[in-house]
Image (tube, rainbow, N blue to C red):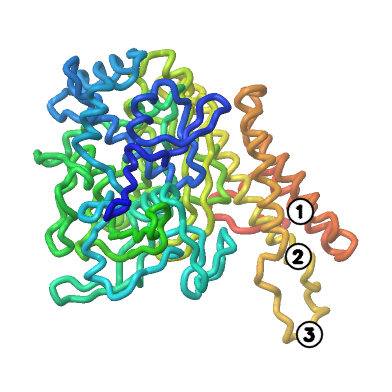
Amino acid sequence: MPDHPSYDIAEEPCLPIRTGRRHEQVGMRELFLRAHTIDDLALTIPPAASATLRVLAVIAARLTTTPGGPGLDDPELSAEQWTARRQELLHHPQGFDPKTVHAYFNAHPLDLLHPTRPFLQDPALADQCPTTSGINTLVFGRPAGNNLAWLSPHTDTDPQPVPCDEALWHLLAQHYYGPAGSCTPRTVAGQTSGTGTAGPLRSTISFHPLGRTLYETLLLNAPKYTGDWPDLPDTCPWEEPQAPDPQAPQHPLTWPGRLLTGRSRHAILLIPTSDGHAIADAYLTWATQQPKLEATDPYLIIHTDPKKPIQQRRTPRRADADRAVWRDLDALLLAGDESATVQRPQIFDTLNDLPTDVRAALRVRACGFDQDGKTRNRTWYTVLTPPIWTWSQENDPAMARRIALCRAAAEEVAARLAALAARAWQEAVTPPHGSRPRSHKVPKRVGPWVTASHTAYWPRAEATFWRLLNEDPDQPARAAFAADAVTVLREVTAPAIVQYRRAAPAVVRAVAALRAGPAPAGGRGRPRRQKAS
């Protein structure tokens, strides 16, 4: 047995892939050598999948530098040259050049357990932290400390080792989605701190173009040079000779390596079992106390609020497990100049120059992690759209506008349904004026109908949305969604009709208001009755 265990992710089968109905795990070297024959990644943890795609996209850009042409990470390429180079690569049926693949992984060992330069880790933590953080702190879903179990039956009193491949997935997820607040204390140059900041993607949803093969997917996920980056050498953390100094100023963001892989706020060190086959413990703490480096991640929808201070004006769309991804389609398909407040992910601005066959088959994978801004994790999710890029504004402006109109109508009806359901509940359960004691107050809670109607409405609205696009393109969108809302409200309130004698009239009024549409701007509640002249 060697003095130090080794787990080289370039060689070890650590990344799940799918080819047809066959699932297997491969190392990074084999993944790039076979990318043109692989259908897709098959990572079952969405935040790990999104993090892995960012890492793979940078490496893919490095591997496009061959004797036959420049790489997609070459800042000297003009926009036209970059587009032409990617089109040339997409037409190359053999995938990545094997010699380039071997040269890259020979030059950059990616050993998860290396004693002095472990992959995306800092070996100094063993001396700078007084205690380990525990393996359960590393693995999303396991309870740590006094936290309750979330996605697994593990306990913090009996932490179980995790296989090295799974530890890699959670290592990547922590770098991008890790928590803020209290962490394992770290002492550097006599200064101790036990507080860190959140990962750059925490609580966000990422949108990744998906091609017909993994080779296409990686080329589609390569971000285009925008000219906004400093003229400095671009390196990824694993391409550096040593871990970053936590006290030094942060390395300026460069494209594409630092942009996609160099913004982590966490420092991690894995501790293997004695045989090196699993990870038994880990250190997880802060990586820097410097302010965050501001950047626009190319896979996020960005919202702009001109009323906020400049530093807070641009924010990414938050992940919401209760929000279906079809409600984000218009934000992906409409060009940036169509909205002053919503900007589609920058990665989608480069898709209209793709070859026709690639563009026609392009789907989108959304990876969301519903979290708060600090420590609480709700759930993660992933969704795969059908081929949608033929509906983009640049290709089919009428369809793009129809999608935006349908989404807006569905949102407006949902808000109207919630307000009317709350009002109907209060009218149904509140005794009429004059028949209740003076001390009795009208209930202010919204009641059970709001949540129940919201839960039932959105699945119906999704089916209606696709029907309005594919089967009934001329049907008015609001009337269709209002019909769904009426059906839902009647179903939700049916049991109360026999329980509360005022429920039926209240529901009738709510149904009439749903069909009539929103109240006039500035108006509240029912219109006032006009006095007779």
Which residue was labeled with disc 3? 437
Residue 292 in the image: state x and y as whole percent: 24, 57
Disc 3 from disc 1: Cα separation:
26 Å
Label 2 environment density (alpha carbons within 10 Å; few <14, some 14–19, many ≥20): many
Residue ID at (12%, 41%): 230
In this rendered view, identify the residue nearer to me: 209 or 420: 209
The numbered mark at residue 402 is: none
Q: Say which of 342 and 194 sits in front.
A: 194
**Can residue 305 be seen at all in this image of the molecule?**
no
Asked if the residue under mark 2 is in contact with the one under mark 1, i.e. CB atoms within 8 Å, the reply is yes
Judge from the rendering whether residue 299 lies leftward or rightward of residue 521; answer left or right.
left
- Looking at marks 2 and 3 on the same chain, the residue that comes earlier in the sequence is marked by 2
Q: Report which residue position mark 2 lands on.
A: 427
* Separation of residues labelled 2 and 3 (CA atoms): 17 Å
Earlier residue among tags 1 and 2: 2
Residue reaching furthest to the front = 1
- SS class, disc 2: helix
Q: Which residue in the rendered view is the most extreme toward the right? A: 498
Q: Residue at 37% x, 55% y: name it.
A: 174
**Element on which disc 3 rests:** loop
Question: Residue 249 lies in what quarter of the image?
Answer: bottom left
Q: Residue at coordinates 27% horizontally, 36% vertically from top-left?
A: 58
Q: Quadrant of residue 59?
A: top left
Q: Which of the pair 188/306 is nearer the observer?
A: 188
Mark 1–mark 2 distance (CA, rounded to whole Å): 10 Å
Relative to 369, is 507 on the left or the right?
A: right
Residue 58 is left or right of residue 44, and the answer is: left
Q: Which residue is mark 1?
A: 509
As helix, strand or loop, the secondary structure at mark 1 comes to helix
Compared to residue 352, the image places residue 238 above or below, namely: below
Residue 51: image x %, image y %?
A: 37, 45
Looking at numbered disc 2 in the image, what kind of residue is underneath it? Glu
